[in-house]
Image (spheres, rainbow, N blue to C red):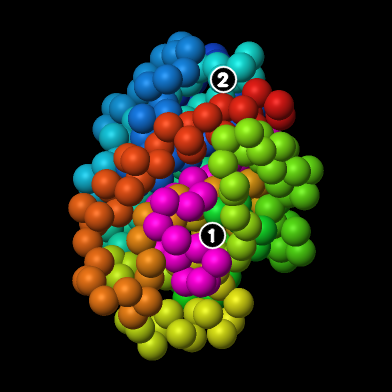
Amino acid sequence: MEIREKVENCVAQIRQKTDFVPRVALILGSGLGALADEIETELVISYNEIEGFPVSTVAGHEGRFVFGYIGGTPVVIMQGRVHYYEGYEMTDVVLPTRVMRLLGAEILFLTNAAGGISNKLKAGDLMMLTDHISSFVPSPLLGPNIEEWGPRFPSMDTIYDLELREIIRTAAKDVMDIKEGVYVQTTGPCYESPAEVRMFSLSGADAVGMSTAVEALTARHMGMRVCGISCITNMAGGTVKEPLSHEEVAAIANRVAPLFQKIVKNAISKI
């Protein structure tokens, strides 16, 4: 099944269950899924209810759409995402982003758990994304372009919307000192080596993770406005003596979750 048919088939199945039209699409990363339980919920659809939809296989990713409202703003939340390292084709990794756009979402709010590279970051910080580096993963735009979705050569000049960034800054002001920086995506699933971290640092990256950048550029291709926040759950490989673990990532994300939830709620209610 070609990608266009697959995406439109997923949209059609969701439309059989609801006519809800979201304005904001929110993707929740590792350990950050609890926000979806805090909203005014209209409907929940598990990914495995949608034929052809990729299903999350990683701990900490619930694997369902939650439709509802945050501060009066209609939202669709991905409570858990899929990753390239799970074995999916890149077109499947970004299929949920395309589906949410075709459901009506105009803004994509991305979140993730990330490793800190910059010495201005520490575990437990939140970092608003100002740019990203996606050069280490395959582009989701490879292959024939679907003109109705977006141009063949989309500009990535300002991937993370300037106005949305200012809204996040304002939303965070009374909650915590939110950091800002550049995010680099790798394929995973292994954590990066110390030499790779040094290379990423030299390339201008402040944090590293295994998602997000490909979803952001897909959303931009389809004309969405994009913003994002990384939860710095650990310092990247080689910057600390202790080996990294997924349990450590989840534990820090859970600790920071209440502050993260407050900032995201504040921001979306102002959009």
**In the picture provided, is 189 more to the left or to the right than 221?**
left
Give the residues drawn in magenta, as a range.
Answer: 106-126
For the residue labelled by badge 2, is the local secondary structure a helix, a strand or a loop?
strand
Q: Please indicate, yes or no, whether residue 185 appears anywhere in the rendered image.
A: no
Identify whether 173 is placed above or below 83.
Answer: above
The answer for how far apart the CA atoms under marks 1 and 2 are is 25 Å
At label 1, the amino acid type is Ala
Q: Which x, y percent locates residue 6?
A: 44, 43
Q: How many marks?
A: 2
Tell me what residue is drawn at x 63 percent, y 33 percent: 174
Reading the chain from its start, which is encountered first: label 1 or label 2? 2
Q: Which x, y percent locates residue 30?
A: 34, 46
Tell me what residue is drawn at x 43 percent, y 80 percent: 197
Nearer to us in this view, 192 or 145:
192
The 10 Å Cα crowd at callout 1, few under 14, some 14 to 19, many 20 or more, is many
Nearer to us in this view, 43 or 142:
43
Based on the displayed image, in which of its 4 quarters is residue 264 positioned? Answer: top right
Q: Which mark is residue 41?
A: none
Q: Which residue is mark 1?
A: 213
Q: Which mark is residue 70?
A: 2
The 10 Å Cα crowd at callout 2, few under 14, some 14 to 19, many 20 or more, is many
Tell me what residue is drawn at x 60 percent, y 55 percent: 179
Identify whether 264 is placed above or below 21.
Answer: below
Q: Which x, y percent locates residue 102?
A: 59, 34
Q: Please indicate, yes or no, whether residue 122 appears anywhere in the rendered image.
A: yes
Identify whether 116 is placed above or below 76.
Answer: below
